[in-house]
Amino acid sequence: MKKRILIVAIACMVMSVAAGCSKNTDNQNAKKEETRVVTDAKGKVEIPAEPKRIVDLSGNSDTLDLLGFNVVGTCNSDAYDYTKLPSYLEETLKGAEILGYSMSDTVDVEAVIALNPDLIILSKAQEKSYDQLSEIAPAIMIELAKMDWKEDFMSVAKLMNREEAGKKWMADYEEKAASLGNEVKRLMGEDTTYLSFLASQGSIFIFDGAGLGSFMYEDLGLARPENLPKQENVSLPVVTMEGLAQINADVLIAAGTDEDYQKLDNSGIWRNLLAVKTDRYKKLPASPYFNQGYSPVGRQVLLEEVRSYIDENQ
């Protein structure tokens, strides 16, 4: 009888421990599965509190990485070759599968499924695929300002519950950029004016309120030239060669392909620009510089490049 009582007691203890373990496992699973509700361009959506496998189609993969998230699929591809990452993101997004280009409205849904994401982020450009994507995993559709990269950066940080981390990164970047801009002005002259543009298929696209333009004018605080066309929306202002001559900046920074530069070199107007005659111009490859100024990581790299230029010319 005593032996039977002992066996029953031991069995109860085992069951109790097992129940406790089960309870702990349930708690751990609950913790893993914690969610929160966010409001995106489509309304309210429940997402993982700490997503581990993000597929980003919106073009904000670099921002997500800076905020500490793991991006397994990205559309932050090179604007001139959608099958590869731009050079400034090769290390940041190493290992992420390239799923296309962020401005495209076409989504490879099967490729997204294969990545087994726990969160999908898309923009208005991919809106027609929203229903399909939201069946794969919780999907957030964000609407970006596009003209103000800082606003877009902080919008993503707030949406992903990383606002403080976003503010810290931005403050650090702004401090470095302002300090570097002052060094550029000391080296090149306080009133020296700068113009950056994209040469593409015979047209001249002026960077003003976005890309390389906002990097120079807003981040570094460099001077704008007279007659600079103001950028009113996401589209870059377009000028003729004659229009480029009327802007008459002290320093020119161009982005283009070899073919684009051949057309420039064949232009008498280009050869007679003051910045060209005084050798105060720089030709950059269209890939990656066309898109680099739109990326927070790209801007970090631009700061490093400007720093190298200053160090070489001190």
Image (cartoon, rainbow, N blue to C red):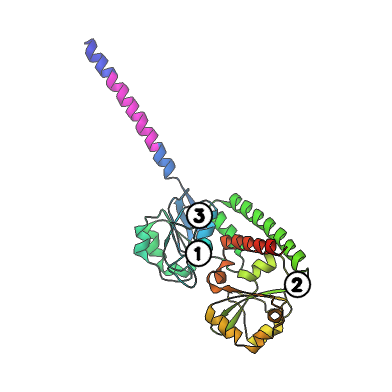
Label 2: element kind: loop
Q: Quadrant of residue 107?
A: bottom left
Marks 3, 1: nearer the viewer: 1
Kindly identify the amino acid type of the residue bearing the numbered disc 3. Val
Q: Position of residue 241 (x, y in %)?
A: 64, 86
Looking at the rendered image, the quarter that the N terminus falls into is top left
Residue drawn at x 42%, y 45% is 33
Question: Which span is picked out in magenta?
Answer: 10-26
Q: From this viewpoint, which residue is outermost toward the top?
A: 2
Which label sits on residue 59?
1
Q: Write down the residue under mark 3.
A: 38
The label shown at residue 192 is: 2
Q: CA distance from mark 2 to mark 1?
A: 34 Å
Q: Amino acid at mark 2?
A: Thr
In-front residue for pair 299/44: 299
The stretch drawn in magenta includes residue 12? yes
User: Height in image: 294 above or below 15?
Assistant: below
